[in-house]
Amino acid sequence: MPYEAVIGLEIHVQLNCPTKLFCDCANTATEKANTHVCPTCIWLPGAPVQLSEDALEKAALTCLALNGELSARSAFDQKVYYYPDLPKGYQLSQHHLPLATGGWVDISDENGKPRRLRIHHVHMEEDVAKLVHETDGRKRISLVDFNRAGAPLVEIVTEPDIRTPHEAMAFLRALRTRIRYAKTAECSMESGTMRCDANISLRPAGSDAFFTKVEVKNMNSVKAVGNAIAYEIERQEKMINEGQPVVMHTRLWDPDKNVTTPMRAKFAGPCIPDPSVPEIHMDTARVDALKQRLPEMPAEKQARFASQYGLTGDEAALMSTERDIADYFEALARNSVNARMAAQWISGRLLPALKDQNAEITDTVLSADRAAGLLSLLENESVNAKQAKELMALMFTSPKSAPEIADEKGFRQITDIDELSAILDAVLEENPDAVANLRAGKKQAAGFIIGQTMQKSGGRANPKMLSEILGRKNFS
Amino acid sequence: MNENTNNLLWQLNPAACEPPPQGILNDFRVVLRGNLPVAGKPSNAGSKALENFMPIEDAAVVKRLKNHGAWLAGMSQMSELGFGITKDTAHRLIGEKQCNAFLGTESAGEIRYLAAMAGAWGYKPSSGICSNLGAVTLLPSMECIGVIAETPAAVASILFAVSGKEDRDFSMLWDNLPVFPAKGDKSPDSGTAGPPIKVGVIAEQIAGLDEADKNAFEKTVSGLVQKGIPVTEVSFPDYDLFRTVHQVIGSVEASSSAGKYDGVRYGHRASNTDNWNDMYLKTRQASFGTLIKAYLFQGAFFQFENYPAFEQAARLRNLLFQKTGALFEDIDFIASPLRISGFDATRAQSVDDVYDALVHALPANVLGLPALCAPGMTRTDDRDLGLQIMAPHLADEKLLNFAAQYLTAS
């Protein structure tokens, strides 16, 4: 019997707020344990709990970026679970009245067909502490680092709409893009600012029943989520085919062995309303104001880039993947630079160079204004592609403009017809065999001649004009 | 500072202390219940789980008491985590004149009950007007600061000092807070002409009293009527639900909240354990006493085994809000005895014993309403039951004015 997978994701995203959710401690990673702590985030008895306005706004913007509807009333609950990473015994989370309900993210399935994957709700919660397991001689010890305790999180809970590992990965990538557009979180699974648990069950294809699900944790990359889901689908299918029951439990993904293994469950209970944090009320005016702060989202931007700047679908998609890249592209395009050339240069030259430098597009010295100067030289054929590449490399270390550097280094392309003709004639004279081949109609000899001419010009000759001059010569 | 004296966890010798600043509370020597921390002094909330807890900050109300010139005299012993009064000593401290005011939190009428035992005035303000910040609390939706003092005016002076918006406490009300007079029996608008106060008594509550208590209360009612206060009987068929609602919600909140008082950090951490889970289990086992354990188990049962009961209790609580609100459309206050002759809260052995003894005090905590306990007005042959008057939310000023005008000997 063919089966289909029913997959729901629970994604924790750490908001990029300067402080923690309920206190003023820094919400930044630091290597020294227990330095970003106070009575509130180490949960001392009676410590004050003050909801961060910034965290609330960033959480709300995140919800809106995911097309969610902000609740008029939301509130925090005590979510009880006993584990040493949560010494107070409960986590403040929104269970009964989440910050937002609904929402969706659009993706393409394996066949390129559009799919809309729904979100059930988004709620806020505080992060727990981090356990560090070490040995003291032969004794195993566990230490608790509270630097992360109380960090502001949103948890995004999807509807069980996902059917394949590809869809899960596409969902996570699209979700990450949208949240990064809202600039509310870094969303890096590798650094732990986005964490994903997957609930997976199988059912006969076409059925709408829900069977016993298994939760899988510990995936530290989008690819790992796909791999873990693929493994779990195969494992459950094998169990069902062998007549073994699937039991509800939690499993850990082992990225080294590419398997999931059962883990000991944390003891967790239902949530109890906690009045120590006041209810959050979102009136229409506040929601409207937040919506105004939301930027154009990637799907809309992609469509606009295609229609406004004439980019191909792939180019528009590439240019809208990240908001900072999109902003850079638009700044270039607005600088009267050919938009398609700008898109190709960003994806083909700039981004690989930045990756090599481990730099971000937002903080590179090669600003969009400076890059516009470079691309103008390329567009009006003052420099050729090879020169433009070298020029870009120099611009990373020099504050000068592209024309200034081009002049200094003699990068200006030779476009004077007489000058080009003189160099070409000299090459023809030095290569009589090639000329003979040309006369014999061997077209590859033209390439050889152009290459020699480029070399003789120190790479400065305009290859297009050279071809035209050569083409006009009569070798018959 | 002396620690572990009989009735006090610690006490301060006034002669050895720096005098408090000039303020309206200069005449008050205040003892605190053991769950209102004072920086640098032990505050164990009556539990082994917190026996080594040394607060680094004063509770918000303690800070305000100090700022208004009160003398801190010490900290009382108390029932574990404030549930019931089996180990509380406030009544003895007041009786021995070791203090003339007492502050603590109450979640089931404990402070008012202790006041009745001490023959003093007990007061629970409206929820949201005094900050619980810094207090070691157990029932977040029902627990609030309670005051014991010698007169309604003294109560009002203390509330003048400790009530009002606390910047770091966002669980408080911010607007339309009651205004308390700094000094004097009455606030500026008291005694002005207005519609006569109407007091109601709940028929179903009074019907459940034993003969002695009923007689004592009827005498109280007669006394009020003689003072020109109309007293009418009102019906509240769901009155018995207060106890059930309090017990289900309260025990669940306690079970959840007690997680942070696990003993691992401040109590006696169990040794000879196999792993951390084992250490947590054994530490908790050793940290909590029998009575609180029973309460936590009840809460854990509702939380983990019968959550629909908790949800139903929450719905019933809402119903009780509505029905009580409807009663207050026709009457100003609800009167009843506070204590019950047949039950002694100091001797409670079980959760049911605690609830049996405190049952009349529960509605004010369930609904967050202001309630006072007046001494000497409702007496049986052997005890002062205390006259409880409960008012609508935020009618604190009116309630204290009424007490000063009609319930004091003068």
Image (cartoon, grey):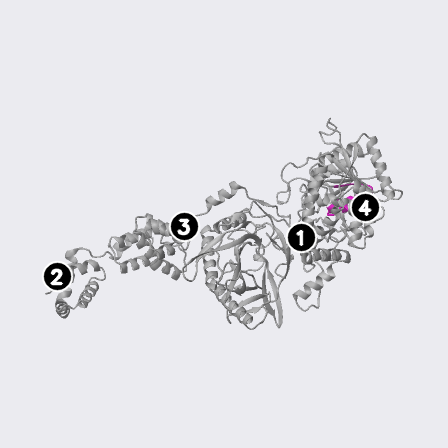
Helix, strand or loop at label 1? It is: loop
Residue of label 2: A473
Q: Quadrant of the C terminus of chain B?
A: top right
Helix, strand or loop at label 2? It is: loop
Q: Amino acid at mark 3?
A: Glu
Contact (CB < 8 A) between labels 3 and 4?
Answer: no
Q: Position of residue A158 (x, y in %)?
A: 52, 56
Disc 4 from disc 2: Cα separation: 117 Å
Local packing at callout 2 (Cα closer than 10 Å; few below 14, some 14-19, many 20+) is few
Q: Which mark is residue A45?
A: 1
Q: Is residue B321 left or right of residue B204?
A: left
Q: Residue at horizontal 38%, vertical 51%?
A: A303
User: Which residues are drawn in magenta?
Assistant: B103-123
Disc 3 from disc 2: Cα separation: 52 Å
Q: Amino acid at mark 4?
A: His
Q: Is residue B57 left or right of residue A29?
A: right
Q: Which mark is residue A300?
A: 3
Image quadrant in which you'd find residue B290: bottom right
Helix, strand or loop at label 4? It is: helix
The residue positioned farthest toward the right in the image shown: B381
Disc 4 from disc 1: Cα separation: 26 Å
